[in-house]
Image (cartoon, rainbow, N blue to C red):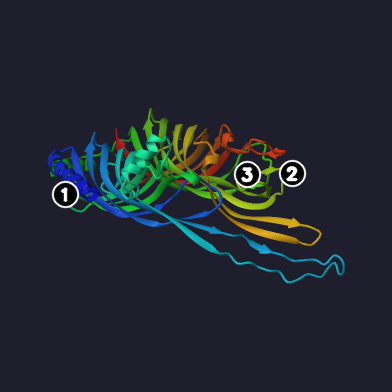
C-alpha cells in the first residue's frame, strides 16, 4: 500500500512539473547522491558511527527575481546508524605491601570488545527553502529553509499506535520528522536549457527518534544533478551576465569565502586548562554599499568553533571538580558547529587596491556539539591500583545553548581581478557576549569548582572572491 502511494505521489509530481516548466519563471530537475548520518542529542556513553546512505529527489524552482528563488522537492533519504559500545582498557599492577614494596606483577591489558546496535530509517522528505544564486556563468547558490518528512520503514501497526495514543504514552519512532536544511551548490550550463550542478547539504531534525538517547536525525549530504530552465529565461540570464555593470561604483556584491579558524574559551574566569583548537569557516557574505567608503554587510557562514581541555575533571567537555568524587585526567577537544549570520559596517579605502576594516554583531545557531579524546581514571587501595583509559566520542549538544550572540571585528585587503571582481584576504575576530553553557542540563547539586562560564572566541583567516551583482 505504501509503495502504491509513493508511486502515485511521484507521478503527480512529474505531471505537475511538466505543466509548470512551460512558464518562464519555473525550472525543474533531479539530483541523486549520498548522505552521512549524524545522530545528535546527548550521547554520552557510546560511539555512534556515521554511515553512508542514499538520497535522491525531484525539485521545482520558482524565480522571484534574477537572484532569489523558492524551491521545493520530493526526496527519498535513508539514514543508517551504528552504535559501538566498548569497555575501557585496564592496566592493573599489584604491589605486595607485606614483603617487597617495589615488586609488581606484569600489567594485564584487557582488549576492547564491541557489540553493535543498528538503527535504520528511511523517509519521504519535503523541503521548502529560499535560494540565492549569483548572476555568473559558473553559478554559486546558497539556500536555507525547513523540511517535513514521513517515515517509510515503520514496523508498528496502526492498532499499536492507536493503543499508545489512548493510553497517553509516546511510541518510537514517530511517524514524521521536521527540521532545518542548509545547502550550497555550484552549477554550470552544458546547453542553453540545462545546468549540471553539485550540491552539499546539512540537515538537522527536531523530533526524537531514539528515546533512551534523546537522539535526533541529522545528516551531511553530497549530490549531483541536472536542472532544466526554459530557453527564453536562460537567454535573459546570459544577457544579464554579459551586460553586467562595469561602473566604478557598484552597490551590491557577493563574496564566497573560506578560511582557517582558531577557537578557544574566551571567558575571563577560565577555571581550567583550556587551550586553542583549529577549525574551519565557509559561506558567503553579501555587501551593500551606502557610498564609496561605507558598506553594510551580512551573510551566512558555517563555522566550526570550540576549544581543548587538559585537566582533572568530572566532565569531559568542561572543568568540574569536588573532593567528594573521583576525578579523571581529561584530554579532549570540543567541536561546536554553528550556522552564523553576521551584521557589520565596513569601511573601505583605496581603489583598485583597497584596505578595509569592519565591526558589528553576529548570531550563531548551533548545529552540532561533539566532544572526543581520552580520559584516564585511576583508583588505589592497600592491595594495589588500577588505571582505566576511556575513549570519548560524545554528542554533547544538550549542554550548550542553541543560540550564540556576540561581537566581531576584522580587517583585510582586496586586490583587483578581472574587471570588477576582487580577491579578498582578511582576518576576523569574534567573541560571545555571554556563556554558552546551558545550566539547566548541568549537575543540580553543585561542585566546589563548577565552570559554567565558557564563551566562544575565534580568529579566522579568510579568503574570498568579491563578485558584483548590481549597480
- Indicate the secondary structure of the residue bearing disc 1: loop
Residue 126 % position (x, y): 29, 42
Residue 471 % position (x, y): 29, 32
Per the rendering, the mark at residue 240 is: none
- Indicate the secondary structure of the residue bearing disc 3: loop
Q: Earlier in the sequence, mark 2 or mark 3?
A: 3
Residue 210 % position (x, y): 45, 46
Q: Say which residue appears at 63% left-offset and 53% top-offset.
A: 331
Q: Is residue 353 visible?
A: no
Question: Within 10 Å of the Cα at label 3, are there few (<14), some (14-19), or many (20+) other Cα atoms?
Answer: many
Of the pair 135 and 395, the residue shown nearer to us = 395
Q: CA distance from mark 2 to mark 3?
A: 18 Å
Q: Which residue is mark 3?
A: 318
Of the pair 465 and 366, the residue shown nearer to us = 366
Q: CA distance from mark 1 to mark 2?
A: 73 Å
| Drawn side of residue 131 relative to residue 171, left or right | left
Of the pair 307 and 430, the residue shown nearer to us = 307
Q: Earlier in the sequence, mark 1 or mark 2?
A: 1
In the rendered structure, are the residues bearing label 1 and label 3 in contact, judged by CB atoms less than 8 Å apart?
no
| Drawn side of residue 139 relative to residue 395, left or right | left
In the rendered structure, are the residues bearing label 1 and label 2 in contact, judged by CB atoms less than 8 Å apart?
no
Q: Earlier in the sequence, mark 1 or mark 3?
A: 1
Amino acid at each position: 500500500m505504501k509503495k502504491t502511494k509513493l508511486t502515485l505521489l511521484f507521478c503527480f509530481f512529474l505531471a505537475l512539473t511538466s505543466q509548470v516548466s512551460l512558464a518562464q519563471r519555473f525550472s525543474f530537475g533531479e539530483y541523486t547522491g549520498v548522505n552521512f548520518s549524524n545522530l545528535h542529542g546527548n550521547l554520552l556513553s557510546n560511539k555512534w558511527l556515521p554511515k553512508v546512505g542514499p538520497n535522491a529527489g525531484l525539485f521545482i524552482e520558482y524565480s522571484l527575481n534574477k537572484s532569489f528563488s523558492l524551491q521545493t522537492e520530493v526526496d527519498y533519504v535513508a539514514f543508517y546508524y551504528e552504535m559501538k559500545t566498548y569497555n575501557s582498557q585496564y592496566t592493573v599492577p599489584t604491589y605486595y605491601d607485606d614483603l617487597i614494596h617495589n615488586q609488581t606483577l606484569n600489567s594485564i591489558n584487557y582488549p576492547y570488545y564491541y557489540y553493535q546496535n543498528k538503527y535504520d530509517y528511511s523517509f519521504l522528505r519535503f523541503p521548502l527553502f529560499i535560494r540565492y544564486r549569483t548572476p555568473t556563468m559558473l553559478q554559486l547558490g546558497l539556500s536555507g529553509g525547513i523540511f517535513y518528512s514521513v517515515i517509510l520503514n515503520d514496523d508498528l501497526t496502526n492498532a499499536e499506535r492507536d493503543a499508545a495514543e489512548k493510553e497517553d504514552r509516546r511510541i518510537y519512532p514517530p511517524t514524521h520528522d521536521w527540521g532545518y536544511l542548509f545547502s550550497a551548490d555550484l552549477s554550470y550550463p552544458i546547453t542553453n536549457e540545462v545546468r549540471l550542478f553539485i550540491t552539499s547539504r546539512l540537515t538537522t531534525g527536531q523530533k526524537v527518534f531514539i528515546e533512551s538517547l534523546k537522539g535526533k536525525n541529522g545528516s551531511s549530504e553530497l549530490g549531483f544533478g541536472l536542472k532544466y530552465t526554459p530557453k527564453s529565461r536562460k537567454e535573459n540570464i546570459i544577457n544579464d551576465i554579459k551586460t553586467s555593470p562595469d561602473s566604478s561604483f557598484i552597490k551590491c556584491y557577493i563574496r564566497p569565502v573560506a578560511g582557517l579558524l582558531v577557537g578557544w574559551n574566551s571567558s575571563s574566569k577560565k577555571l581550567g586548562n583550556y587551550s586553542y583548537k583549529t577549525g574551519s569557516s565557509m559561506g558567503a557574505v553579501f555587501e551593500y554599499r551606502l557610498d564609496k567608503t561605507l558598506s553594510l554587510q551580512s551573510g551566512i557562514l558555517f563555522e566550526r568553533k570550540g576549544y581543548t581541555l587538559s585537566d582533572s575533571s568530572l566532565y569531559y567537555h568542561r572543568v568540574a571538580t569536588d573532593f567528594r568524587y573521583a576525578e579523571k585526567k581529561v584530554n579532549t577537544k570540543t567541536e561546536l558547529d554553528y550556522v552564523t549570520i553576521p551584521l557589520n559596517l565596513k569601511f573601505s579605502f583605496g581603489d583598485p587596491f583597497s584596505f578595509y576594516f569592519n565591526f558589528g554583531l553576529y548570531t550563531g545557531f548551533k548545529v552540532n556539539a561533539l566532544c572526543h579524546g581520552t580520559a584516564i581514571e585511576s583508583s588505589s587501595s592497600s592491595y594495589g591500583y588500577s588505571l582505566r583509559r576511556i575513549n570519548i566520542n560524545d554528542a554533547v549538544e544538550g549542554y550548550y545553548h542553541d543560540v550564540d550572540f556576540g561581537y566581531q571585528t576584522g580587517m583585510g585587503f582586496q586586490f583587483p581581478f578581472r574587471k570588477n571582481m576582487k580577491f579578498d584576504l582578511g582576518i576576523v575576530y569574534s567573541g560571545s557576549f555571554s556563556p554558552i553553557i546551558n545550566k539547566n542540563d548541568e549537575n543540580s547539586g553543585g561542585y566546589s569548582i563548577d565552570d559554567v562560564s565558557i564563551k566562544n572566541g575565534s580568529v579566522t583567516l579568510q579568503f574570498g572572491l568579491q563578485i558584483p551583482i548590481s549597480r
